Image: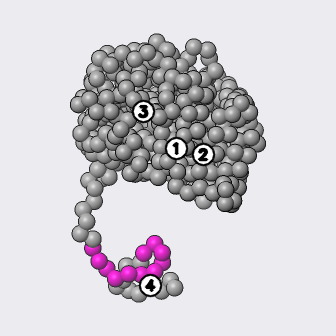
Amino acid sequence: VGVVVLGLVGSVTGLSTPTMRLRVERNANFGKLQGGYLFPEIGRRRRAFAEAQPELAERVISLGIGDTTQPIPPNILEGLVSGASKLGTSDGYSGYGAEQGNAELRSRIAERVYGGRVGAEEVFVSDGAKCDISRLQLMFGSAVTSAVQDPSYPVYVDTSVMMGQTGEVGPAGQFEKLVYMPCKPENEFFPELSETPRADVIYFCSPNNPTGAVATKAQLESLVERARADGSIVVFDAAYAPFIRTPGVPKSIFEIEGARECAIEVNSFSKYAGFTGVRLGWTVVPDTLEYADGSKVRDDFNRVMTTAFNGASNVVQSGGMACLTDEGMEEIDALIDYYLGNAQILRGLADDLGLRHCGGIDSPYVFLDLDGRSSWDTFSAILEEAQVVTIPGAGFGPGGEGFLRLSAFASRASCEEARARISKLTHLFA
Ligand code: PLP
């Protein structure tokens, strides 16, 4: 074990193998991707800091990747536990389930999340929104054009690149053949649709990651109107929907008239119930959504789910059922209240520093406007001087440069401490 013989190539296992060269060409689309995925890169920089300054490593607070931190509340946990326990009994045991998800869970999502606006057969239960975005891309294929908000959750861009929908990245950091919809303070972080070229598929996220902006009903109506006029599909990412508390602000694209003919919604229990590690989400594909040839998008997504997915875990779906009971929904509200309380502290930090910001209301993210300062430099300075991990806006696309994202997914004490430490760094923002 561990013997390395000169002339042989060491492998990651520590064992050695004779030199050989594959004759398999790399998928060229992967060569177009920029560096690593953002969040592992943040983790790498955090570890590098801890190694360089071990005496400060313990002090590091993360307001970074947007991972939930609070424990799963008791009723929802009981759903998971009972789902697991059943597997140990002859009566309760189940194996493969329906690839589209447990029928009861599908109806409960249709009823309790959508108030019956969508049908149970239009809900596809999955292992999460990120995975569903990739599976939607698999369905759309490489010939479509996609549009993304800039900045945006990196998965829409990276999966479009992986699928071969784009060209190379240009000098401005934008991929050829991908439509970027700038979202900035001047347009209240909502794209200027009249200036946006047509795309087949429009990825739109509200409440938004990373900007924290929440689209109003009128804005979503204009989005749906545009998609209908262009014959485009909106992929609406509602992963942060339960953070919306302001009356009248839509939590789903299906609250907008006309969306059933032009929209798909991806959603997830990750941020609702602390299921980021548990893994449970869903996608709604209306029966009324039809491709140019009249075929149903839903049928193709069903084909993807039955072929490239094998159903969400039965244990986890039992947890999902518990989320959508009265008790579970109260627990979700309490969890979200907690994170919204954190968001308020982070907005207070922006005020302490005299920085303009977006988000933190109806949203777990606060997007600080650095007034032209470099986001990676500010990220590094805050890590060095305050030992707080944030996320540089540039990691979310060129439109995020000059901004810093703070995440409310942390403990209350961490948010208060982070505010106290960062608000002293006034020299960085003078
Ligand atoms: N969509 C957005 C906008 C997100 O920010 C995230 C996670 O941070 C996801 C989807 C991923 O959701 P899931 O955990 O269900 O894969």
Mark 4 and ligand 1: say if the CB distance to the nearest ligand atom is below 8 Å. Answer: no
Residue under label 1? 101
User: Is 259 in front, or is 119?
Assistant: 119
Spatial CA span between label 1 and label 3: 14 Å
Q: Is residue 291 magenta?
A: no
The disc placed on residue 317 is 2
Q: Are marks 3 and 2 in contact (CB under 8 Å)?
A: no
Residue at image location 35% in from the left, 28% down from the top: 289
Residue type indicated by callout 4: Val
Residue type indicated by callout 3: Val
Eye-nearest disc, 3 or 4: 3
Q: From where the camera sits, is residue 260 visible?
A: yes
How packed is label 1: few (under 14 Cα within 10 Å), some, or many (20 or more)?
A: many
Chain-order first, disc 2 or disc 4: 4
Residue under label 3? 285
Residue at image location 71% in from the left, 30% down from the top: 326
Image quadrant of residue 220? top left
Residue 103 x, y percent position in the rendering = 54, 40
The disc placed on residue 4 is 4
